[in-house]
Image: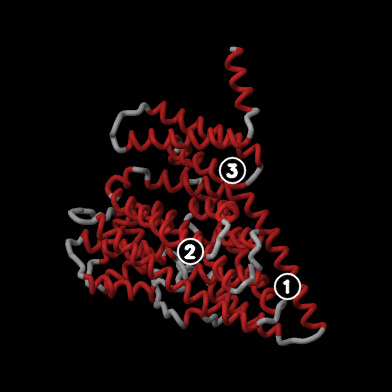
Amino acid sequence: MRVKCAVFVRFVYMDNKKVLLLALSLFLLDSLLHVANWLEWTVVPTAVLHISRWLFMIAMALYAWRIRKLTPYILLCMFLGIEAAEWFPTAAKELKVFSDIFLRLIKTIIAPLLFSTLVVGIAGHSDLKQVGRMGWKSILYFEIVTTIALIIGLIAINVSQAGVGSSLNAQTEQVDKANQLLEQKHSHNVILDIFPENIAKSVAENQILQIVVFSILFGIALAQLKGQRKENMLHAIEGLAEVMFKFTNLVMLVAPLAVGGAIGYAVSSMGYGVLHDLLKLLVTLYAALGVFVLIVLIPIGLLVKLPFKKFINHISEPLSIAFATASSEAALPKAMENLEKMGIPRKVVSFVLPTGFSFNLDGTTLYLSLASVFVAQVSGIELSLAEQIQMCLILMLTSKGVAGVRGASFLILVSTVSSLGLDPQKAFAILAIDAFMDMGRTSVNLIGNCLATFVIAKWENEI
């Protein structure tokens, strides 16, 4: 008994680094046991799997309690959500309400936050030429990086041949979900949809790019005013920006519950069984995303002398939110706040980051090229190099400016495979693991856009 108490006391009074190292070691052990059992390399008793996970969660809980930061609490709740889905699958589905509440609150933040930060950034400095410069530099950077992402996606799926010989058929649940998404499909004009026709409508529909355009024009108009009227308006809008950042901090208190609810719902609704049939596609996607980060984003970071440790510390919190909720919107307010804390000027952050979520979806564009060829492989059709290049050109246009559309990536996938003469219903089966794939591509979208913000700030000599 005394020995057990001594071990417990020693554990509780470990320094933070040792607790974190212990938590990571237990996480690695837990992951290896689950993978070995899942791939049937060996039979691991269920009790051992649960004990390994709970030991990791206890260590993570101690670390979270010690440092009192949001990120470890978010990671802890992710695993609690998985555990809840395994033990109480029916109840876990109801946990989605926490995720829905969080996303609703986030949506109330985005429009006033973007408006206030952009207007203050433009009108407060009155450097209208810089807005134009940041605009063309951002678009140039976005196009180059997303084109590379498309190419990496093509190479990955052609190497893995994940769909060759597959006889996947969409289940009733996937067909119903696909039909619901296709029902809300609407014509998408890349250029026209950038401009708002009614700002209230843009806010209601959460059209981020339209809100950005309105805010830029408003900021330019305010910059042209002189005297006390301009100062009064600018002071009020600056106050709004500060309030919205405080509002964001309050909403973030709900983030761990939201993350746990989102993960619990995903696992209890789909389970792990669907991964067996589409495991090769899922592994191909995550491998391609990893390669993209390693050979594209990291070299860009080295080129612009990105302080990697500082950067990772500041994006870890919004990144964990983006991964667990599979929503870029959910991470946007916190990402803006943290990048500003990192030293990037508000006027750059408020312009580049939200624009990037419409034009610089690195993870999504990589997924689209990969998934389109996968559908062709499942259909038993080998696309020529010319056809794959044609597909990339289509995706370069259709993937822009649709971040606010629900199920946008699936709609683009369906329209792309249709344009290639393929049966779009072959894409329905992918929806079985879409939530798991969305976590990865959304995370890379966020990393890419945070890096893009630093690159443009460096290019503008603002840092």
Q: Quadrant of residue 168?
A: bottom left
**Residue type marked 2:** Ile
Q: Nearer the viewer, residue 161 or 225?
A: 161
Residues under numbered marks 1 and 3 in contact, where contact means CB atoms less than 8 Å apart: no
Local SS, label 2: helix
Around disc 3, counting alpha carbons within 10 Å, would you say few (fewer than 14), some (14 to 19), or many (20 or more)? many
Going from the N terminus, do you reach mark 2 or mark 1 first? 1
Around disc 1, counting alpha carbons within 10 Å, would you say few (fewer than 14), some (14 to 19), or many (20 or more)? many
Q: Does residue 396 appear in the picture of this structure?
A: yes
Q: Residue at x 72, y 68 (%)?
A: 240
The residue labelled by disc 2 is 300
Local SS, label 1: helix
The residue labelled by disc 3 is 73
Q: CA distance from mark 1 to mark 3?
A: 33 Å
Going from the N terminus, do you reach mark 2 or mark 3 first? 3
Q: Residue at x 38, y 33 (%)?
A: 33
Q: How many marks?
A: 3
Quadrant in which the C terminus is drawn: bottom right
Residue 408 position, x and y percent, is 41, 67
Residue 352 position, x and y percent, is 56, 71
Q: Residue at x 55, y 58 (%)?
A: 330
Q: Quadrant of residue 89?
A: top left
Residues under numbered marks 2 and 3 in contact, where contact means CB atoms less than 8 Å apart: no
**Residue type marked 3:** Tyr
- Single out the mark in the foreground, 2 or 3: 2
**Residue type marked 1:** Ile
Q: Nearer the viewer, residue 48 or 459?
A: 459
Residue 462 position, x and y percent, is 64, 70
Residue 209 position, x and y percent, is 53, 74
Q: Nearer the viewer, residue 131 or 195?
A: 131
Going from the N terminus, do you reach mark 1 or mark 3 first? 3
The residue labelled by disc 1 is 237
